[in-house]
Amino acid sequence: MNDETKKVEIMDENTRKLWRDYAWGYFSQHAEQRLKAFNFYITSCAIVIGAFATIISRKSVSIEYAFLPLSLVFLSFIFWKLDVRTRMLIKHAEAALKYLDSQSLKGLPEEAKILALFQKDDEAKSKLKKYLLVGGLFTYGRVFNWVFVVMALAGVAGSVACVVAQPSVPADGSASASLQQPCRAG
């Protein structure tokens, strides 16, 4: 019998279970970390938006208030980059679990392939029609990215609104009371 026709068991069942537990723990830890980071991001954005809304409702417009909504852009960028990294770690774990599934299901009847959950998910996703912006599934990654973009744009809009709504000061340096309007950013 030559080497090509021999079936070599790469891992025994105990080793496979050890690797599956490791891969599942890795997947679970990073998936949980991703959701916690996103919750922290949403909380941070809510604090910034609340502070900005409170300040602009009580005080007249000042250029330094434009930096508060710009912090939404900064937060969005930082948490987006963290999410990209965490998503990559989750994909590594998924790849390991797919491999372990393929090894575990070798030699089993075709009906047992239903147990390869990650593989089934990939097959189902590949069959969906893809439309720009709304096609396919709304995955966590896709929804998170939309939230990051919307918050960053809201930050830019809030800053621009404060700069544009900045009262003009007459040449003599005195500002009339009627020009000192609070910035009412959307």
Image (cartoon, rainbow, N blue to C red):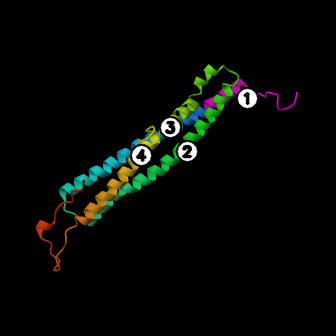
Farthest residue to the right: give it: 1
Inspect the image, locate mark 4, and give the three-letter code of the amino acid beneath it.
Leu
| Residue 93 left/right relative to 1 | left
- Rendered-image quadrant of the N terminus: top right
Q: Which residue is mark 2?
A: 88
Q: Which residue is mark 4?
A: 133
Sequence-first tag of 1 and 4 = 1
Inspect the image, locate mark 3, and give the three-letter code of the amino acid beneath it.
Ala
Depth check: 73 or 109 in front?
109
Question: Helix, strand or loop at disc 3?
Answer: helix
Within-10-Å neighbours for mark 1: few <14, some 14–19, many 20+: few
Question: Helix, strand or loop at disc 1?
Answer: loop
Sequence-first tag of 1 and 2 = 1
Above or below residue 104? Residue 126 is: below
Sequence-first tag of 4 and 2 = 2
Sequence-first tag of 4 and 3 = 3
Cα distance, mark 1 to mark 2? 26 Å
Q: Which residue is mark 1?
A: 11
Sequence-first tag of 2 and 3 = 3
Q: Are marks 1 and 2 in contact (CB under 8 Å)?
A: no
Q: Which residues are magenta?
A: 1-21
Inspect the image, locate mark 1, and give the three-letter code of the amino acid beneath it.
Met
Q: Which mark is residue 31?
A: 3
Above or below residue 78? Residue 104 is: above
Within-10-Å neighbours for mark 4: few <14, some 14–19, many 20+: few
Cα distance, mark 1 to mark 4? 43 Å
For the point 30% across and 58% down, the residue is: 157
| Residue 17 left/right relative to 67 | right
| Rendered location of residue 124, percent (x, y) | 52, 32
| Rendered location of residue 89, percent (x, y) | 56, 43
